[in-house]
Image: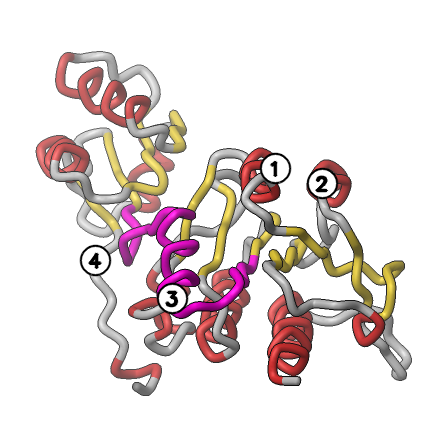
Amino acid sequence: MSENNVEVKSLVIEGRNAVLEAFRSGRPIDKLFVQEGCQDGPVRTIVREAKKHDTILQFVSRERLTQISDTGKHQGVIAYAAAYEYASVEDMLELAGKRGEPPFLILLDGIEDPHNLGAIIRTANLAGAHGVIIPKRRAVGLTAVVAKTSAGALNYTPVAKVTNLKKTMEELKRQGLWFVCADMGGTEMYQMDLKGPVGLVIGNEGEGVSRLVKETCDFTASIPMKGDIDSLNASVAAGVLAYEVVRQRMI
């Protein structure tokens, strides 16, 4: 499927009734913007729904809402919905089991560029990863740009959004996974055994993997570099390491 043929659902929901119905229908909402000072019954109901679903909630000025509105009829609330349904981490483990393969997951620590996220999801699909895990905060969700950049991979590769990446990793460790994060100071990836149940952790575009997440990883892996600069784009690094996993599993 070409990128231009990827079907992307509407992402911006405006107006009180529309936003409330989106929550009640179970549609995944990544973020809710509410006008500061709006405290009437319908708005309070929407805020309660947002908190119930652990949606990121931001109170902003009316001017800010008007600025991001597509219609100018936001009635004090605008929701950003995910372009695709999120999966669960359990879905990924079940997929690995159905394929008879050790789990191979890609975890992204604070990827904020939607093009990077889309490219990583595309690579995850081609490399046979069983899913991609992203954190709920300080990271891009499944936006229209992500969906388009993935070139259809979102139709086949589960993406889960979790509240706490470190806690999720600890839970997966108890199920037999071990984790390796990309880090320039790590062991060269060709010297590592990546054939078992593994989670590959990629940090954000500027700061890399955060301290707490890095401390939760079992190992760090570096990519050999021969040029004059010292870092790769996050999606490129994910691709290089993912295909080292592929190479080793083919041996």
Q: Amino acid at mark 1?
A: Glu
Residue 157's tag is 3
Q: Are marks 3 and 2 in contact (CB under 8 Å)?
A: no
- Label 3 to label 2: alpha-carbon separation: 25 Å
Vertical placement of 218 versus 136: above or below? below
Q: Secondary structure at mark 3?
A: loop
Give the image location of residue 55, x and y in percent. 35, 32
Which residue bears the numbered disc 2? 216
Q: Nearer the viewer, mark 4 or mark 1?
A: 1
User: Which of marks 1 and 3 precedes in the sequence?
Assistant: 3
Vertical placement of 1 versus 27: above or below? below
- Label 4 to label 3: alpha-carbon separation: 20 Å
Q: Residues within 10 Å of mark 2 (few under 14, many from 20)?
A: some
Is 30 displayed left or right of 221 in the figure? left
User: Which of marks 2 and 3 precedes in the sequence?
Assistant: 3
User: Which of marks 4 and 2 precedes in the sequence?
Assistant: 4
Q: Secondary structure at mark 4?
A: loop
Which residue bears the numbered disc 1? 170
Give the image location of residue 105, x and y in percent. 53, 59
User: Which of marks 1 and 2 precedes in the sequence?
Assistant: 1
User: Which of marks 1 and 4 precedes in the sequence?
Assistant: 4
Q: Nearer the viewer, residue 183 or 217?
A: 217
